[in-house]
Structures are given as C-alpha cells and as structure tokens.
C-alpha cells in the first residue's frame, strides 16, 4: 500500500507541476507579447543570433515543445523558411535547461537564511503575492505577472509533492528493485522516452529524476540515460504538430528529432566508451538535484556544439527524408500559431495589412478605369476581389478563435481592430467590382458624361483616392492621430456627392443629360459614398481601439455635434481643396 499511496502522490504532484508550468508559460508568453514575433523575424542568416533567440524565447515561454510547435506553424504558414529554424531549435534545446535549474531549489536543505529557499517556505508567499496582483490590480501586465507567480508556486508545490513521494520510498525494497531496471542504459533511455512522450514535458520527467535522487538509488549511471531519454521523448509534441502540415513544416519536426537522436547516440556512445577506457569515479555517486540539472545542461550544450557545424548536412538529411515541397505549399495562418497568441496576433496583423493594401490598390485600379477601360485590368480586379474575400474568410475564422485566448491588453486591442476592419476592407473590394462594371458598361454602351459631370467626378475621384490612401496608411501604421483626419474628409465627400446629385437633376431638367446617363452617375455616386463610409469606419476603429474603447456612434456623434477645433480646421482645409465651400 505504501507504493500505491506514493504513486498517487507522485501523480498528483505531476499534475500540479504540469498545470503550474502551463500557467506560468502562458503568463510569460503574454508578458513578452509581440517581442517574440519580432525576435523570430530576426533569425535569418546569422546562426549565432538564431541560437540566441531560440534560447531566449524558450526561457521566456518555458517550453521547448511550445517553441517547436510555434516554428512548425510559422513554416507551415510560409512566414519562416525551414532553414531558418535549425539554429533556433538548437538554441531552444539549450534554453529549456533553465527550468530544471530552477527546480534545484526543491532540494535545498539547511536552516537560517537557506531555509527561505525551500519551496515549502517561499511558495506560499509567492502565491499570495501573485493572487493579490491578479485580484487587486486593474492593469493586465500586473495581472499577467501575478499569473506567472501563481504558476511558479503551483509548479514548485508539484515538485515538492513528487519529492515527498520519492523520499517516502527511500527504504522500500520493492521500489528499490524496480529502480534496478535503470541500471541498463538502453532500458532507461527507452522508458524515459516513452514516459516523456506521454506527458509531453521533458522538464517534468527530469524533475521526477531529480526527485528520485532522494531515494539514494539513482546514480549518475542511471540519471544520464534517463535525462537523455527525456530529451528524445519531448519530440513527441513536435511529431504530433507535424501531422497535416506542409512538407516544409514537416522538416522542422524531422530536424528536431534528428538533433535529439543523434545527440543521444553520440553522447551515450562517447561517454560510456570513455567510461570503459578510463573509468569515471563518480558513476556510482548520487547526482542530487544540481547533478541532474547539470547533466541536462551539459548534454544540450555539447549536442549543440557538435551539430552546429553540420547545419547544411541536417538540411540535406531532412530533404532526403521529406521531399522538397512544391512552390507555394503553405497554409494561410496555421492555427498552431494560436497556441502562442502574441505570435498569432502579429502574423494576423501582417495578413490584414496585406488585405488592406490589396483593397486599396484594387479600388484605385477600378477608379482609373473610369478614364480608360482596359479588360486586362478589369480581369485583375475580379481576381483581386476573390483574394480579398478569401482574406476576410480566413482572417475572420482565425481571429474569432484567437479572441477566445488569454492575451495582453495591446494584443486584445489589435484583434478587436482587425475584427472590426476586415469586413470594411472586404466591402471596399466589392465596390471596386461595382465601379469596374460601371466603367465596362460605359465603355460597351459608349456612354459619356457632360463636361460639368466629368469635372465633378474628377474632383470627387481625387478626394476619394486621398481618403482611401490615408485610411489604409492610418491602419497600417496604427496611427490614431493620422486617422482623425479621415472623418473631416468623409464629410466633405458627402457634401460633394450631394451637390453632384443636385446638379445632375438640374442638368436633367435642362435636357443636358439623359436618363441613362443619370442611372450610371447615380450608381457611381452611391459607390463613392459607400466607399468613404467604409473608410470612416476603419478610421474610427483605429481611433477607438487606440484609446481602449469602441463606440463608433458615440465618437461620430461627438465630433459632428461637438465640432472639435481640429475637426473644423481639417474640414475647412479639405473643403477648400476640393471646392466644397
């Protein structure tokens, strides 16, 4: 029964450990925010920088598995190349060793000041501080920091439970006999690999190995293969993440596994070969908590040093196992990125900016057809509109799923901005098609406006091109001040449209234009008005998300009725420019 109760305590401790690790890594990821994505983008041709970033980001999110899943998603989305990930993976392997050095605090013994380093003494204090920050602070960053502290406290409690379970079995003969299986390095490697693959956390497996040292039955001879097996087992997460991805993304998992397996084989063969020749005196010693952490660190550092010069060979090996991908074989914003919200938000924004610029270019092209219709350009507008629709569909689905995840205030605002804007960008694409069809009708039926109508439309088109260009620029730059100039111009465009409609009625009554021409002009003016309205919506979204609230009607009502000095100044400036006074 003693073994049964110890096993239950071990499982409970493992559950606390894994949950605490999840909470802590989630908080660290939110706190890091977009810095993770910006850092990864720097991992280009510089191998040392790539390794440094891999190590740094893994330390930040406390999970090499999450790092690998992130890389698979980035490559699958075409946001990174496979070659760029190799040095990042090597650095990640080194960065993941920090966790187990933190866990060595569980093995601290002594009285006085040293007793403060014992988890059972400092974990309650850390947890209380963390909970107080979560409950009492209104700032998200402080709440995220509180979650990190609570996660750390839970993790250390879990480690303490596992240590207690192992310590209680110190004198159990049955348990001692079970541990003799680890005397065989191959069996130890296999068991550790399988166990780590099941729980998908090498840090937890190595933490258990550290706890096992309390029994006095684990020596360096047993701990070394157990630690190396845990390094192979952690590849299970990468293997699972590679299911259903592009061939380029599969190579990330292949290289990750290759590095671990080659490193384990080389290090085991080299270490035990030297032991057979010269005989290491420490092999029978108990490594303790620091010793296990040292094994983990030395293995990953040595492994990285050995394989670092063979980057090209690793690429060739991956290409041999996974045939090169077809050109363009990528997935639009792989949902694996959602596991790291800060990365997902940044990449979604990159795609949304592409959508905005495509909508702008498509509309500008459609406006140019009013002067001279070109079938080639008309066909391209239709193709662009389909692409814009695809953007909205994919981005909408991705952002809705992303919005359910916990993220920083700034990331949450950016998601809100994108969700409020992609519909307007999609409608701009629709209006581009409408304008193209109107231009085609005028071309096919040889419809021509009067000189007065042409001048009105020329003036309106210039105003429309300016509001469209400025709106997209404000969105891309996320510039709230620049966005405030959009609404005054939208009001001027409304005045110009109203005047053009009145002038058209006068021309119709005077017999200067036909009913057919009037229908075409009405369609154009309606599209112009809708386009400026959508630009206004986008600008308001930029402004309101920038100040932390979102009430379009309240904002528009305020500036129209209140008439701020800046609004009045901009309005008169645009009115004078486009002769709307």
Image (cartoon, rainbow, N blue to C red):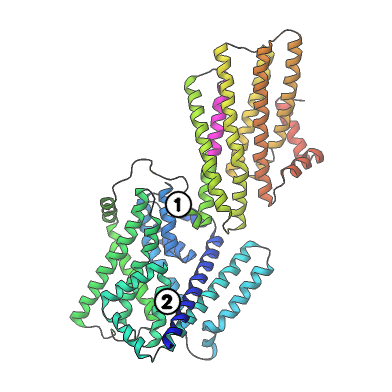
Q: Can residue 408 be seen in the rendering of this structure?
A: yes
Task: Point out the image quarter for the C terminus.
Answer: top right
Q: Nearer the viewer, mark 1 or mark 2?
A: 2
Span shown in magenta: 355-372
Q: Position of residue 152 (x, y in %)?
A: 53, 73
Q: Position of residue 203 (x, y in %)?
A: 42, 71
Location of residue 303 (image quadrant): bottom left
Q: Residue furthest front?
A: 1
Real-space CA distance between mark 1 and mark 2, rounded to the nearest whole angstrom: 33 Å
| Relative to 107, residue 196 above or below | above
In the drawing, what numbered circle is on residue 207?
A: 2
Asked whether, in this view, residue 59 is left or right of residue 226, the answer is right
Residue 431: in magenta span: no
In terms of secondary structure, where does tag 2 sit? Answer: helix
Q: Position of residue 78 (x, y in %)?
A: 42, 46
Residue named by callout 1? 41
Q: Position of residue 446 (x, y in %)?
A: 57, 11
Q: Residues within 10 Å of mark 1 (few under 14, many from 20)?
A: some
Asked whether, in this view, residue 95 is left or right of residue 439, the answer is left
Location of residue 535 (image quadrant): top right
Q: Residue furthest right?
A: 561
Q: Can residue 53 be seen in the rendering of this structure?
A: no
Q: Which residue occupies 75% across, 15% down?
A: 505
């Amino acid at each position: 029964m003693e073994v049964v109760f110890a096993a239950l305590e071990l499982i409970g401790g493992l559950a606390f450990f894994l949950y605490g690790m999840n909470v802590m890594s989630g908080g660290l990821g939110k706190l890091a925010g977009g810095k993770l994505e910006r850092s990864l983008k720097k991992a280009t041709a510089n191998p040392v920088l790539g390794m440094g970033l891999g190590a740094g980001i893994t330390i930040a999110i406390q999970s090499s598995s999450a790092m690998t899943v992130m890389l698979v998603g980035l490559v699958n989305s075409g946001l990174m190349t496979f070659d760029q990930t190799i040095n990042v993976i090597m650095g990640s392997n080194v960065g993941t060793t920090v966790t187990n050095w933190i866990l060595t605090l569980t093995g601290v013994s002594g009285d006085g000041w040293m007793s403060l380093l014992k988890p059972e003494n400092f974990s309650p204090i850390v947890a209380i501080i963390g909970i107080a920050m979560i409950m009492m602070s209104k700032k998200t960053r402080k709440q995220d920091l509180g979650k990190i502290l609570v996660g750390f406290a839970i993790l250390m409690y879990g480690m303490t439970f596992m240590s207690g379970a192992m310590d209680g079995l110190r004198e159990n003969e049955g348990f001692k006999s079970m541990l003799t299986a680890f005397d065989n390095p191959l069996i130890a490697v296999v068991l550790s690999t399988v166990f780590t693959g099941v729980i998908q956390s090498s840090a937890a497996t190595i933490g258990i190995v550290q706890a096992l040292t309390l029994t006095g039955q684990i020596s360096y001879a047993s701990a070394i293969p157990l630690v190396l097996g845990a390094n192979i087992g952690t590849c299970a997460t990468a293997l699972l993440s590679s299911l259903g991805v592009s061939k380029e993304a599969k190579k990330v998992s292949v290289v990750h596994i290759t590095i671990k397996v080659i490193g384990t084989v080389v290090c085991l063969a080299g270490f035990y070969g030297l032991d057979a020749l010269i005989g290491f005196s420490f092999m029978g010693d108990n490594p303790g908590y620091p010793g296990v952490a040292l094994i983990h660190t030395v293995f990953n550092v040595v492994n990285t040093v050995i394989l670092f010069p063979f980057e090209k060979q690793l690429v060739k090996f991956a290409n041999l196992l996974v045939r090169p991908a077809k050109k363009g074989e990528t997935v639009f914003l792989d949902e694996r990125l959602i596991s790291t919200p800060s990365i997902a938000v940044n990449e979604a924004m990159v795609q949304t900016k592409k959508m905005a610029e495509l909508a702008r270019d498509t509309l500008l092209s459609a406006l140019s057809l009013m002067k001279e219709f070109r079938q080639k350009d008309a066909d391209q507008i239709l193709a662009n509109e389909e692409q814009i629709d695809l953007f909205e569909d994919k981005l909408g689905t991705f952002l809705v799923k992303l919005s359910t995840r916990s993220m920083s205030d700034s990331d949450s605002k950016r998601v809100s901005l994108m969700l409020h804007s992609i519909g307007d960008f999609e409608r701009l694409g629709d209006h581009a098609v409408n304008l193209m069809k109107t231009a085609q009708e005028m071309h096919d039926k040889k419809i021509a406006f009067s000189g007065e109508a042409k001048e009105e439309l020329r003036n309106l088109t210039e105003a429309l091109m300016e509001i469209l260009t400025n709106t997209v620029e404000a969105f891309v730059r996320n510039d709230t001040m620049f966005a405030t100039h959009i609404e005054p111009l939208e009001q001027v465009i409304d005045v110009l449209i109203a005047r053009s409609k009145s002038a058209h009625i006068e021309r119709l009554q005077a017999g200067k234009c036909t009913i057919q021409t009037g229908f075409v002009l009405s369609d154009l003016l309606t599209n112009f008005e809708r386009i400026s309205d959508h630009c206004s919506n986008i600008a308001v979204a930029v402004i309101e998300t920038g100040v932390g609230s979102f009430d379009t009607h309240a904002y528009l009502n305020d500036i129209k009725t209140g008439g701020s000095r800046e609004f009045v100044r901009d309005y008169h400036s645009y009115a004078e420019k486009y002769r709307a006074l």
